[in-house]
Image (spheres, grey):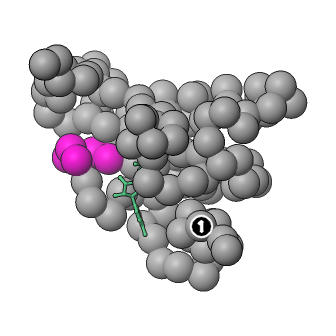
Amino acid sequence: MPTLFEKIIAGDLPANIVFRDDRVTAFLDIRPAAPVHILIVPNKVIATANDVADEDEALIGHMFILARDLARANGIDADGYRLVVNCNAHGGQEVYHLHMHLLGGKPLGPMVLRK
Ligand code: AMP
């Protein structure tokens, strides 16, 4: 079963795509948790951070460089932002296709609530 993100990358599910090239697709999160909430997704299927291979090093770097550029393009670079990758159940991962969240546009508070 293809994930939602595979369908978006294939063009079979609509999304608000803000960038795409042969390696990555970036689109707006459907339930934004901040004024800027963009998902940066590799076009190739990598289920979780555990499944990143050594050969993916350049791809992962490309996602990071794109996050930098999208932060700048959205005017949140100077105030700051957060990059998040959730992995598996304890990480709160909902979609099993690796993605990086770019969040910003307001103070985001503590990264994880301490109890
Ligand atoms: P994660 O918990 O890290 O797996 O995050 C999955 C994210 O995907 C959540 O923030 C969802 O709001 C987002 N999401 C789910 N379905 C869609 C969709 N069709 N288009 C855009 N974002 C989505």
Q: Element at badge 1?
A: loop
From the image, tell me which residue sits under label 1: 3
| Residue ID at (59%, 67%) | 3
Q: Residue 83: percent from the left, percent from the top?
A: 41, 29
Asked whether residue 9 is drawn in magenta, I would say: no
Q: Nearer the viewer, residue 65 or 83?
A: 83
Give, as a three-letter code, the residue at label 1: Thr
| Residue ID at (48%, 28%) | 68
The C terminus - image quarter: top left
Q: Residue 81: percent from the left, percent from the top?
A: 30, 27
* Crowding at mark 1 (Cα within 10 Å: few <14, some 14-19, many 20+): few
Q: Can the viewer see residue 105 in this picture?
A: yes
The N terminus - image quarter: bottom right
Q: Is residue 12 depicted above or below 92 in this figure?
A: below
In the image, taking residue 75 as reference, residue 10 lies left or right, namely right
Q: Residue 79: percent from the left, percent from the top?
A: 22, 21
Q: Nearer the viewer, residue 82 or 19?
A: 82
Asked whether residue 35 is drawn in magenta, I would say: yes
In the image, taking residue 94 as reference, residue 113 lies left or right, namely left
SS majority, magenta: loop
Q: Which segment did they paint magenta?
A: 33-37
| Residue ID at (42%, 35%) | 91
In the image, taking residue 18 as reference, residue 79 lies left or right, namely left
Q: Residue 42: percent from the left, percent from the top?
A: 66, 48
| Residue ID at (57%, 54%) | 96
Q: Residue furthest bottom?
A: 12
